[in-house]
Image (cartoon, rainbow, N blue to C red):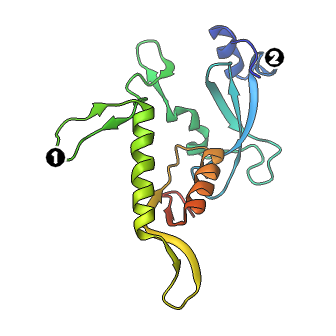
């Protein structure tokens, strides 16, 4: 459960390193950085609505509280700096709704999540049904499809990557890649 949202000034105080404010006004959540295969531990702090800052987990055996610039800037996956007010705000241009471009069309159109998920599910099922191999040419059981690939993203957190990987494996997808693997 989140605590009640903290006032902006309290969040700023906590983010500036005020330990008491950080511990009482914000919720601390542990995660693992997904930017690269080092797997550094990160503590995320949220105000009830969004993550307001992050720091290395001092108890984590890999990074012992340190983070490289990428891990340190992880909350800027969805933030930009408002130059006028010199503050971080959620990127107003962030795409939050699915976009669809029909075959041959020049324009993208906004569609609902229900429609997008139904389209994706239908296409995955059709492709999998048409290409699924139970055994390879030597008669060895493989239960796979090589017609679908999955490309990960360093903007996904560790938990999201875990769930996606589990789903892809369950579907028999073996072509998985991620640009940040080591
Ligand atoms: S990107 Fe940096 S912080 Fe993240 S796991 Fe790799 S080394 Fe650690």
The foreground one among 155 and 114 is: 114
Residue 22: x and y in percent read: 76, 21
The foreground one among 177 and 40 is: 177
Nearest-to-viewer mark from 1 and 2: 1
The residue beneath circle 2 is 24
Q: Residue at x 64, y 47 (%)?
A: 158
Secondary structure of residue under mark 2: helix
Asked if the residue under mark 2 is in contact with the one under mark 1, i.e. CB atoms within 8 Å, the reply is no
Residue 84, above or below 113:
above
Give the quarter of the figure containing the N terminus.
Answer: top right
Residue 152, above or below 76:
below
Residue 114 in the figure: left or right of residue 34: left
Secondary structure of residue under mark 1: loop
Name the mark on residue 59: none
Give the quarter of the figure containing the C terminus.
Answer: bottom right
Residue 146 in the figure: left or right of residue 102: right
Residue 91 in the figure: left or right of residue 166: left
Residue 165: x and y in percent read: 59, 56
Q: Residue at x 70, y 27 (%)?
A: 45
- C-alpha distance separating marks 1 and 2: 54 Å
Label 1: how many residues lie within 10 Å, few (<14), some (14-19) or many (20+)? few
Residue 94, above or below 124:
above
The residue beneath circle 1 is 104
Q: Residue at x 55, y 89 (%)?
A: 139
Q: Is residue 136 visible?
A: yes
Q: Which label's residue is closer to the chain start, 1 or 2?
A: 2
């Amino acid at each position: 459960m989140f605590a009640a949202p903290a006032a902006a000034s309290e969040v700023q105080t906590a983010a500036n390193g005020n330990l008491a404010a950080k511990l009482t006004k914000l919720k601390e959540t542990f995660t693992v950085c997904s930017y690269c295969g080092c797997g550094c531990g990160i503590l995320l702090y949220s105000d009830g609505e969004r993550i307001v800052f992050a720091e290395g987990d001092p108890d984590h055996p890999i990074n012992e509280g340190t983070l490289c610039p990428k891990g340190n800037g992880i909350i800027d996956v969805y933030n930009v700096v408002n130059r006028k007010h010199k503050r971080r705000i959620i990127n107003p241009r962030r795409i939050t709704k699915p976009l669809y471009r029909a075959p041959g069309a020049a324009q993208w159109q906004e569609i609902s999540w229900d429609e997008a998920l139904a389209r994706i599910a239908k296409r995955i099922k059709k492709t999998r049904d048409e290409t699924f191999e139970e055994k390879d040419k030597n008669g060895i059981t493989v239960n796979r499809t090589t017609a679908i690939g999955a490309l990960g993203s360093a903007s996904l957190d560790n938990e999201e990557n875990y769930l996606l990987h589990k789903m892809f494996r369950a579907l028999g997808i073996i072509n998985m890649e991620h640009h940040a693997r080591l």
